[in-house]
Amino acid sequence: MAATGGGYDPNPFDEDEVNPFSKKFLLQGPGARGKTSGESNYSGGTFFTPNPGSIPAASNSRLSPLPPEPADFYNPTATVDIPLDSVKDLKKKEKELQAKEAELRKREQEVKRKEEAAARAGIVLEEKNWPPFLPIIHHDIANEIPVHLQKLQYIAFATWLGLVLALTWNFIAVTTAWIRGGDATIWFLAIIYAISGVPGAYVLWYRPLYRAFRTESALNFGWFFLFYVLHIVFCIFAAVAPPIVFKGDSLAGILPAINLIGSHVLVGIFYFIGFGLFCLESVLSIWVLQQVYMYFRGSGKATEMRQEAARGAMRAAF
């Protein structure tokens, strides 16, 4: 405890009240109090330094300010100037687009005019859409055939596909017979049956039936009946395969199957399968012919066809 005057100082560590922001304190510096009081060499404040007088006064220096930011720097909706083509280039492109548009409009009008002329002449423009992976024919039963005839048309289409299957299998069976020692002529005949039969059936009887159902044409019905009867006769002949042409081995029918089953079992089995396919095709084709004829008679197309035949005969006579 330190004595002060005539008594004891209750707080010997108490310092003199000093205002660090006073004018006097600022002029004398931070070490002035220590020199005058002689009580402490430490300066007051938050940080204490053992020799405050040795620290030079801070210079009155200033940092250079940052450059000002644009007024719309933080505006997300502000427009950004992007360099575009010159006005001359824009006008040139606009003229080119207008010329192309006029050309397309002209072509569209020309196509429309041709379609209207074809419709007036009774010509139907058909787009090839079947089979989907390689379109070679136009086939759209759901949109072109009346609803009450679609089932019959689908079954007629099945008979055409059945003929394709039967002739393809016939080619396989005859090829097997030729490899097992048969005559090469039967193999060439099997190729002719397949190449001529598939497109011939489509053109001669399936397509006329399709057009007859779509346009109610009596003439197309006549073409269908004529060639569909020939188709049925061929299927029955192929199922039997009588030994008329090269002993009937060029067709996979029942008679050559019986002859071959004893010597070549595999070839005989193939011929029996062909016989089953031709039988199925014959039965289904007979049913289709019956149904189409019933519709033909019930719709009055038979009378119309007779009238057209009579008018054709009169024109030929005169």
Image (cartoon, helix red, strand yellow):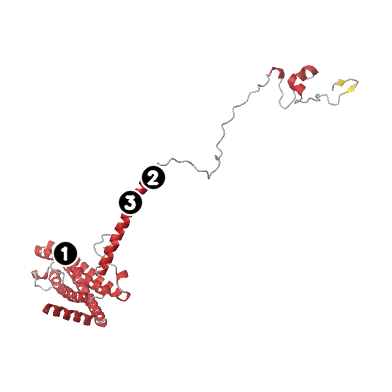
Q: Give the Cα separation between the discs numbered 2 and 1.
A: 60 Å
- Does 230 appear above or below 28? below
Front residue (pair 123, 128): 123
- Does 60 appear above or below 151? above
Q: Give the Cα separation between the discs numbered 2 and 3.
A: 14 Å
Q: Quadrant of the C terminus?
A: bottom left
Front residue (pair 43, 209): 209
The image quarter containing residue 139 is: bottom left
Q: Residues within 10 Å of mark 2 (few under 14, many from 20)?
A: few
Residue 308 position, x and y percent, is 19, 79
- N-terminal of the pair, mark 1 or mark 3, is 3
Q: Quadrant of the N terminus?
A: top right
Secondary structure at badge 3 equals: helix
Disc 2 marks a residue whose amino acid type is: Leu
Residue at which label 2 appears: 90
**Residue in the picture at 36% in, 45% down:** 92
Residue 226 position, x and y percent, is 17, 76
Residue 197 position, x and y percent, is 17, 68
Horizontally, residue 57 falls left or right of residue 239, namely right
Residue at which label 1 appears: 195
